Amino acid sequence: MKTAITELFGIDYPILNAGMGRVAFPNMVAAVSNAGGLGVYGAGSNPPDVTRAAIREIRKLTDKPFGANAPLALPNGMANAKVMLEEGVPVINYSMGKGDWIVKAAHAYGGKVVASVSDVRLAQRAEVHGCDAVIAAGYEAAGHAGDIGSFVLIPRLAELLNIPIIAAGGVANGAGLVGALALGAAGVSMGTRFWVTQEGPMHANFKNKALELDVQDTIFSDRFDGIPCRQMKTAAAERMVNAKMLNVWEIFLNSFTIAKELKTPWFKLVKHTLSLGPRQIESMMRMSKMLQMHGLTMSTGDLDKGMTASGQSVGLVHDLPSIAELMKTLIAEAEAVQRRLAAQIPLNEAPRFQDKVASAPRT
Ligand SMILES: Cc1cc2nc3c(=O)[nH]c(=O)nc-3n(C[C@H](O)[C@H](O)[C@H](O)COP(=O)(O)O)c2cc1C
């Protein structure tokens, strides 16, 4: 399974886990890299010292190439990208911002840089800025995504770009991997599929819930944090989208916890938020609520109050394997699909990897 990105990153399989903040921890990263893919750490809005410690831990757990994601627009985003550069992370993946300065500094030590994009303009800008590849997230994707489906976005970018494209959104099995390659991608990045694994840090209640959900059980809205974003359809997510007003008192109290978690003085956090303007203030307030609810998906597993990002691909996830098992299955499925296509065997006559899927329970 050699593609432009297996060559670029020095990996065996063109499979990445998404650099999910507060989810893709060092054990997940190492498990993916040790299985021949590219594990990607999610720095989210971590304090920079937490990110540095995580990168050092990953290096203890694997000697394979790995990556790290920094969402530049989040608090601590730029500082985390600087830590990644200082630590010489082999592949830096940035999202939500402009990363030409990251490209320059990473290339100086032989690192690679991948921008996460959701439309043509952002993808072309990433190429102009010297990125080595893009991760293109289609409408199906968990978290922040654009409104163009992967089936259209990937082939259009393949027409326009000279750098490799990694498809994200809607991929959760070997058929998705082969499909993405057929559309012109050089690999895939999966978020939802990787958190519904033994290594995923979510509480068992949420992993089991994910196994019950179908492709329609997510919500895509800008009412989570002001930017269009896809979340698992839980009671809390529905309440947040439908709420006419934010509970300002609750958010005020939550801001103390957030300041502590970000290791930022409370008044500095508030001053920074207030300086952003009315739209951004509301966005930050919503984000603080989202972080609080995301925390519950890991701690208490409260299915009523908790909420997490999840892609439409959640409907394709039917088991809870270890990452090593998952990687083997993905490759076996992809090879079976390739054989079927090469032999032109109709799907109804081929041994179906979907057999186990067909019997999966549905709500
Ligand atoms: C729980 C979760 C957290 C995420 N956090 C981030 C993040 O911190 N930075 C980022 O660029 N993308 C993040 N994403 C989005 C992924 O990068 C990716 O676009 C998405 O997971 C692809 O869709 P899929 O989940 O269907 O595979 C997150 C996704 C999930 C599921």
Image (spheres, rainbow, N blue to C red):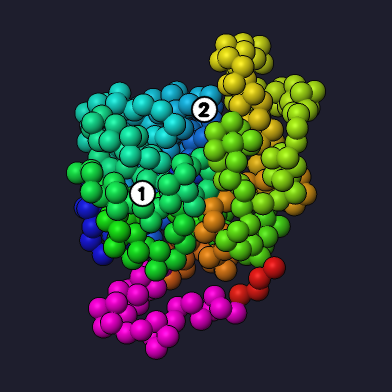
Residue 179 versus residue 67 in the image, above or below: below
Residue 182 versus residue 265 in the image, above or below: below
Q: Do we see residue 187 in this rendering?
A: yes
The three-letter amino acid code for the residue at tag 1 is Leu
Query: Quick check: 159 left or right of 52?
Result: left
The three-letter amino acid code for the residue at tag 2 is Leu
Residue identifier under label 1: 153
Identify the residue shown where x is 28% and y is 36%: 124
Identify the residue shown where x is 22% and y is 36%: 110
Q: Tag 2 or tag 1, which sits nearer the N-term?
A: 2
* x and y percentages locating residue 88 in the rendered image: 32, 33
Element marked by disc 1: helix
Q: Kindly identify which numbered label has been placed on residue 74.
A: 2
| Ligand 1 within 8 Å, label 2 CB | yes
Q: Quadrant of residue 195?
A: bottom right
Identify the residue shown where x is 44% and y is 28%: 72
* x and y percentages locating residue 261 in the rendered image: 63, 28
Most extreme residue toward the bottom is 349
